[in-house]
Amino acid sequence: MKTTDWIRGLLRDGQYRPGYRELQELSEKAKRAAGVYNHEELSGLIYRYRRSDEAVERIALAIAKSEPFINPSSTANRYSIEMMDALLSTTFMEKHGFRLSDIPPNEATPIHGLLAMYTFMCDEELRKFPINGMKRPADDEVISAIRILDSQRRNRDITELCELSAYSMLPSRYVMMRYGLERDCDAYRCMEDNITASDNPRALLQAQADMCVAAEKAEENIPGVRLPDFYLENLDRELDRLGRIVVSPDAVNDLVHTGSDFLTKYGLDRDALPAEQSRQAWKAYRELDGRFVRMTGRRPYIRKVCQCCYGRSPVTPRRKRHGHKRHGATISAIRLRLKVKAASPLSDFKTDLFTNNFF
């Protein structure tokens, strides 16, 4: 076989085709460079093998697997921009597609996910800190990038949000920015790093409560979301604690099951009067029970709590009746007022559970 024939075999269709062993070595080099975020070396590999679609694809997959764009500052730097520019200039990306607005989310590949994250982070960085000579990505590209990321990261994002609300585990920077939690999470992290045990912990508890409540709103408003079991179980335990406080306000002093973080999250005051504590717990119980009905479709538990407090279900409002039963209704109202006057403040609250102020 002549040398010219061998070269012609490597350059079929005008492309350089490395052998199997060379591709394996290239994959190992790309994995090592991507693992330590050596974008300068990756740019050199892309430029060297830019004529081979198979080689460029292996390098791009190694980069996508390493998830290099974890925050805006690590994205809009010199070596990251040079690496992505080298990748986008290859014939492989021209064939694979680099305009995100032309790619349906359900057909996007991991390489499209890499490009979508790069577009999202660059837009966030340039929006906050404009850089001379760099333009923000087009709006349709940013919107398409968010759609692709939502399709590929849906379950992962939901898990991070649930871990944040249940265990106060801070999520990735992308989840913070995507769901509007960046300010609350940064405030909590700043206070956690600077507030010591001798300082007043109320500010830290309030920042933690605001962060968890914001995460719960974000995850429960995702269309068609299927929340993890551990998240629902955690909320069910909190619902049970609120129910016990409604029935017996002394439960707020149970330091084992009712911590300060729990009281702050649901707006309960440990130093308030028992009747006021029951009112606060009832308001929080009613809201959380309604959220459970929307999330799971189960029947509300609010009537069971009313039966525990007063021995019967709440009375639904009825139209006023006239005629011969009017006198009897007036006598019943007088008896109820006499009974309320003789009751304690806590029994006053339990009586009010069945009025229109609580339903």
Image: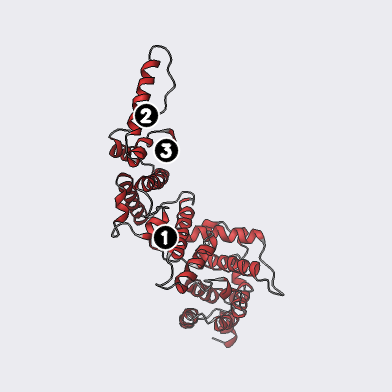
Residue placed most toward the observer, 295 or 345: 345
Residue in view at x 41 percent, y 57 percent: 264
Q: Quadrant of the C terminus?
A: top left
Q: Quadrant of the N terminus?
A: bottom right
Residue 145 x %, y %: 58, 61
Farthest residue, direction top: 324
Residue 183 x %, y %: 54, 64
Q: Distance between the residues labelled 2 and 1?
A: 52 Å
Q: Is mark 1 on a helix, strand or loop?
A: helix
Q: What element carries label 3?
A: helix
Decide which of tag 2 and tag 1 comes sooner along the chain.
Answer: 1
Q: Of circles 2 and 1, which is in front?
A: 2
Residue placed most toward the observer, 230 or 206: 206
Q: Which amino acid does label 2 sit on?
A: Arg
Residue in view at x 63 percent, y 61 percent: 141
- In this figure, which residue is indicated by the disc labeled 2? 337
Decide which of tag 1 and tag 3 comes sooner along the chain.
Answer: 1
Q: How far apart are marks 1 and 3 (CA)?
A: 34 Å
Mark 1 touching mark 3, by CB under 8 A?
A: no
Decide which of tag 3 and tag 2 comes sooner along the chain.
Answer: 2
- In this figure, which residue is indicated by the disc labeled 1? 159
Report crowding for label 3: few under 14, some 14 to 19, many 20 or more residues within 10 A (C-alpha): few
- In this figure, which residue is indicated by the disc labeled 3? 358
